[in-house]
């Protein structure tokens, strides 16, 4: 079964509750969750005049094809109340596909691996927690090494519930 890595994030409402609901929906609709990182908090990236985000990475085993995964996670976001008003804007939940095995895919709707993951400490830190030796199939570098080389200076800290 393919191994899928997803990044969950959100900065509105009961943030930990939205992450939990997203995990439950992913387990029910996408596949079995094998590993969950801790939850991390960071200031907003890209559009900075908004509340801080909570983020978490999941490793999921799935029988779904990448486009099916995308459809399911978009549905989960919508079910949880995500409204897309502006690029990098505030949101109750965001679910990104980081990796799907070692697949490299670029379509109009989907790019795998996620094209920005190696530039974002808030993605690399939780990913390195659960899969430090995972190798980025395009950059041919481990997640641990990408984290060490990351130029993103935004502080990321473990969220204490």
Image (tube, rainbow, N blue to C red):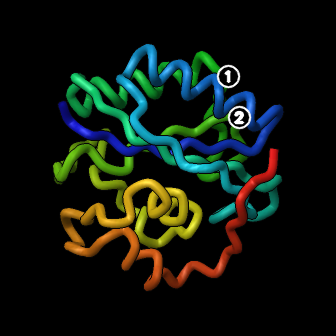
Give the residue drawn at x 46%, y 82%: 148
Q: Quadrant of the C terminus?
A: top right
Alpha-carbon span between mark 1 and mark 2:
7 Å
Which corner quadrant of the image does residue 154 belong to? bottom right
> Residue 72, relative to residue 97: is it above or below?
above
Give the residue drawn at x 41%, y 16%: 29
Which residue is labeled 2 in the image?
92
Viewer-nearest residue: 83 or 37: 37
- Residue 122 coordinates in the image, percent (x, y): 58, 62
> Residue 91, relative to residue 128: is it above or below?
above
Viewer-nearest residue: 109 or 15: 15
Instruction: Say few, some or many: other residues with alpha carbon within 10 Å of mark 1 (under 14 / 14 to 19 / 20 or more).
Output: few
* Marker disc for residue 157: none
Give the residue drawn at x 20%, y 73%: 140
> Residue 65, relative to residue 102: is it above or below?
above
Q: Are marks 1 and 2 in contact (CB under 8 Å)?
A: yes
- Residue 50 coordinates in the image, percent (x, y): 81, 55
Instruction: Say few, some or many: other residues with alpha carbon within 10 Å of mark 2 (under 14 / 14 to 19 / 20 or more).
Output: many
Q: Secondary structure at mark 2?
A: loop
Q: Secondary structure at mark 1?
A: loop
Q: Quadrant of the N terminus?
A: top left
* Marker disc for residue 81: 1
- Residue 28 coordinates in the image, percent (x, y): 45, 14
Dot 1 or dot 2: first in sequence order is 1
> Residue 31, relative to residue 19: is it above or below?
above
- Residue 133 coordinates in the image, percent (x, y): 31, 66
Which corner quadrant of the image does residue 94 belong to? top right
- Asked if residue 84 lies left or right of residue 128, the reply is right
Give the residue drawn at x 36%, y 55%: 114
């Amino acid at each position: 079964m393919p191994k899928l890595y997803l990044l969950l994030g959100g900065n509105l409402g009961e943030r930990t509750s939205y992450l939990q609901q997203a995990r439950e929906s992913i387990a029910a609709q996408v596949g079995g969750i094998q590993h969950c990182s801790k939850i991390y908090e960071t200031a907003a990236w890209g559009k900075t005049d908004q509340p801080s985000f909570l983020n978490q990475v999941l490793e999921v085993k799935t029988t779904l094809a990448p486009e099916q995964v995308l459809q399911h996670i978009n549905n989960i976001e919508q079910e949880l109340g995500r409204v897309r008003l502006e690029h990098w804007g505030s949101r109750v939940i965001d679910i990104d596909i980081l990796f799907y095995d070692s697949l490299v895919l670029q379509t109009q709707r989907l790019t795998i691996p996620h094209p920005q993951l190696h530039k974002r400490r808030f993605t690399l830190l939780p990913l390195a927690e659960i899969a430090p030796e995972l190798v980025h199939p395009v950059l041919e570098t481990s997640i641990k090494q990408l984290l060490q080389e990351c130029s993103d200076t935004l502080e990321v800290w473990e969220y204490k519930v």
